[in-house]
Amino acid sequence: MADAITVNHISKRYGTVEALCDVSFNVQKGEIFGLIGPDGAGKTTLFRILATLLLPDNGSASVDSLDVVGDYRLLRTRIGYMPGRFSLYPDLSVEENINFFANIFGVTLEQNFDLVAPIYRQIEPFRKRRAGALSGGMKQKLALCCALIHKPHVLFLDEPTTGVDVVSRAELWEMLADLKEQEISILASTAYMDEGLRCNRVALMSEGRVLEVCSPPDNLEEYFIEKLGNG
């Protein structure tokens, strides 16, 4: 069975800055895989390449068995992408944002309601409220709902809990565990070590490089610091 994501020796530079250097790893189908590292580790650049928004300088990658460069049009119909910054339309209501993204993919909320129901029920009381007026936690739930509306095979979440309260962070990861049970493969990045423990496997990243790919040990923070020292 093919992997959900395969990354082979990806590199990317911005002028003199080496954002990614020879990055390789794979994400198995139906697993939650975490990219763990501080700001500047290269996580967002890698997400943008895998989501077909940015071309790599070297290397190759495939998502859902599709090449991120050659098959980008088809691939965009099979992935859900939730960037680090809130990127929905703040002047549209919750309901209008969901309908907008559903229309883009030629679906309706009703068609995939079973998938998004646990999330949608939490934001439904605010369906007429403008997205820009939501709390941080509710914004993230709306963004996740919009990313899932077309039932993607692979879900990309770039630091989904940054700036979100502790309770909302825990709720979001519980939702991800439920999505995994529905055979959606998930790649999520975070700087929080406790969130890394919720992943099946993690790639420890620093300064554009993958230090190690492993199942997260209980002492993940100490382990990561040790890897940084050895690197």
Image: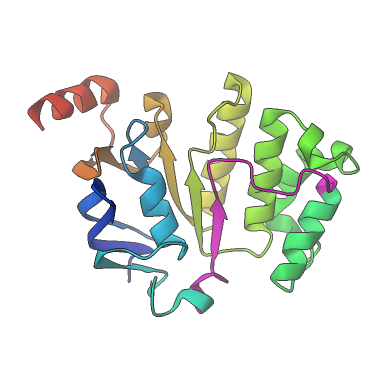
| Residue 98, position as x, y percentages in the image | 77, 55
| Residue 2, position as x, y percentages in the image | 33, 71
Task: State the predominant SS element of the stretch in magenta.
Answer: loop
Residue at x 20%, y 22% (from the top left corner): 225
84 is higher (above) or lower (below) than 23 = above
Tell me which corner region of the image, top left, top right, bottom left or bottom right, holds residue 138: top right
| Residue 79, position as x, y percentages in the image | 53, 63
Q: Quadrant of the N terminus?
A: bottom left
123 is higher (above) or lower (below) than 113 = above
Q: Is residue 142 left or right of residue 153?
A: right
Tell me which corner region of the image, top left, top right, bottom left or bottom right, holds residue 106: bottom right
26 is higher (above) or lower (below) than 207 = below
Confirm whether residue 30 shows in the render: no
Residue at x 24%, y 38% (from the top left corner): 207
Q: Is residue 138 left or right of residue 168?
A: right
Residue nearest the viewer, comparing 42 with 125? 42
Total labels drawn = 0
| Residue 156, position as x, y percentages in the image | 49, 52
Q: Residue furthest left?
A: 230
Confirm whether residue 140 shows in the render: yes
Q: Residue furthest right?
A: 128
Q: Is residue 201 left or right of residue 53?
A: left
69 is higher (above) or lower (below) than 127 = below
Per the rendered image, the range of residues in magenta is: 74-94
